[in-house]
Image: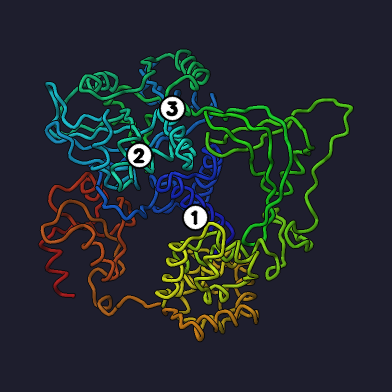
Amino acid sequence: MNKIEKKIKLLQKSLIYHNYLYFCLGKPVISDHEYDILFNKLKLLEKKYKKIYFSSPTRTIGSKIFSKLSLNKHLTPMLSLENVFTEKKFLNFYTKILKYKNEFLVNFVCELKLDGIAVNLIYKNGVLRKASTRGDGEKGEDITQNIFFVKSIPIKINGKNIPKLMEIRGEVLILKKDFIKLNKKNSFLKRNKFSSARNLASGSLLQKNFLNLKNRKLFFICHGFEVFNFFLDNSYYNILLKIKKWGFNISEKIIYSSSIKKILKFYSQIKNERFLLNYDVDGIVIKVDDLKLRKKLGVRSRSPRWAIAYKFPNQEKKTILKKVTFHVGRTGSITPVAHFVPVKISGITIKKASLHNKFFLDKLNLHINDRIFVCRAGDVIPQVVRKETINTKKRLIRIHFPEKCPSCRSFLEITSKSKKNFCTNYFFCLEQIKKRLVYFFSKTSFKIKDLGPNIINQLVDKMGFRNPIDFFGLDFHTLNNLKNVGKKFSKNILTSFKKFKSINLDKFILSFGIHGVGQVVSKKIAKNFKNLNKILDLKEEDLIEVCGIGKKITKNFINFIQNKNNRNIIFKLINNYNIHVKSYKKKDKNNKKFSFFLNKTILITGVFKDFSRKVLCNKLKNLGAEIKKSISKKVNLVIQGKNPGKKIFYAKKLGIKIIKENDFLKKISKN
């Protein structure tokens, strides 16, 4: 794999991870602007080097779904919007539309860009039948039961000229006044406050406890629709007004215009007034009004060509820097954090922000009591933007990055690529030890119930615990003597240790928190070397051959498994505490040898009598096929059920072989 391919794959992995945090967890760690920089970088590389993959984030919507909830398939894909942050990019979009139509005037509808959770509502004969989150764009989590608690969503549409089947799309959010009331109530009851209205709305939609939903006052605003075999109007604006008459809320501020000046004026107006609105907005959405023109313009793989989101710049507030603290991470990385006089931005009070690394800190040239400008990047992540440069005779104390680790006083090392400073005192740095132990017993690894940071930190500080083996000898008396640890917690922890008998090989590798060895790398190592004995005998040349594992990660992994202390811990877990590390088992591939479907790239469309879509996909994968969701020249077989979609039309156009359900059953019976 060459450098360009590696760079592309790294960007894809990074964007897939950030999509998961945003769409599935509702907890982004980077701003929209930072996401767009990564996204555009990947887009340019894929285009320049012609390395376009159909699973790439540039061609997919939303995120892969990891939820345990059942899933609903959208009748039509829920596309994302392309974001622009400058007037120049908005004008590029505007002129492209005019050129396409070859006219001087095109009408646009401008609405508020709501900072909520996108949902899809399916109505049959005017009655709400299903509700789903955006999910991966093709299907989303089933939230039908929860959506009935959103009073602003009509269960039945009353009126004339209502389509038999339609999708209504919009955002579920919590009004600012209701969010403040909830936090005041939590404060009075001495409960934790909610961090943001968006996260609360996201969590509420996936709630299993319906009693919580009654108090959360979720609110719905419609911004889209899909109508089937029915004509309402050719104007998006006119249909929106009809939807409003049916009982749905639409954008509080909305304009219908063909004028650039009016659109830009609307953008400036909302930018200035957004904090007076009763819900969070982060820009405006500009859409072509003419539905026929929309069809001609079409869509890209993940976004329509007829609409964009023109986002607001980050709001900045001035404050005073009080101090900078330095934090040691699980892998030894040192992160500076700025603490300042609290400021309120977008309704949220913030008092600290990460300064990332030594390079960023030195660039800002910070001093105690400096006046600094702070923003919430993408209205989410607190960030120090710059400091105010003023002439002062006062001698301010400059903040220097430490030469030694704040925890163990070891000298730090710096990496040239990441510009991060690291403490290399792996075994004796208490902060690293604490964080590694938290990771070891977390849900992703050994999953010991109720053994969280509070208990682990106390056991390290008071009882001298230093590695996982110490925890396997825990008793009730030790736990019960810790602060804020009662009988119930103690019992849960000890029961969890007793029940813990086995762990998958990839999770076992992951649990040690080796630098650079995350879930993907752990699975690759497990898949390639099958069992723990082989892995413990690995050499650098063995691991470097595995696709996607570079020299740095290889070195980190080999250093870890060759270390005597680490090997002792592994052997004690297996021999003294009878922990069974399950070997990696390959699925049975005997059926693949003579399969008609072996090595074929297959697309499935329509509904099948004898199989669900999931069962059908699994059968084909077991027979050696690769399943694709979208049509392309790479697809060499289409399996067609009843009521197929537009994919059949494109398949015929590309000359791809199509087989129907009966032919498929005959072929599958031969395998």
Q: Would you name the residue on which mark 1 appears?
A: 13
**Residue marked by disc 2:** 79
From the image, state whether disc 1 or disc 3 is nearer to you: 3
| Amino acid type for the residue under numbered disc 3 | Lys
Q: Is residue 18 left or right of residue 357?
A: left
Residue type pointed to by label 1: Lys
Residue at 22% of width from left, 42% of height from top? 75
Q: Are marks 1 and 3 in contact (CB under 8 Å)?
A: no
For residue 287, above or below residue 141: above
* Residue corresponding to mark 3: 176
Q: Residue at x 33, y 35 (%)?
A: 215
Residue 234 vs residue 535, the one in the foreground: 535
Location of the N terminus by quadrant is: bottom right
Classify mark 1: residues with Cα within 10 Å, few (<14), some (14-19) or many (20+).
Answer: some
Pick whichever, 257 or 386, lies toward us.
386
Q: Reading the chain from its start, which is encountered first: label 1 or label 2?
A: 1
State the SS at label 1. helix
Which percent across, then down, holds residue 158? 14, 24
One can see residue 376 in this view: yes
Tell me which amino acid carries mark 2.
Leu
Q: Residue at x 89, y 27 (%)?
A: 393
Residue pictured at 43% horizontal, 29% vertical: 181
In the rendered image, residue 400, in percent from the top left (x then y), is placed at 80, 46
Q: Quick check: 225 left or right of 483?
A: left
The Cα–Cα distance between marks 1 and 2, rounded to whole angstroms, is 20 Å
Q: Secondary structure at mark 3?
A: helix
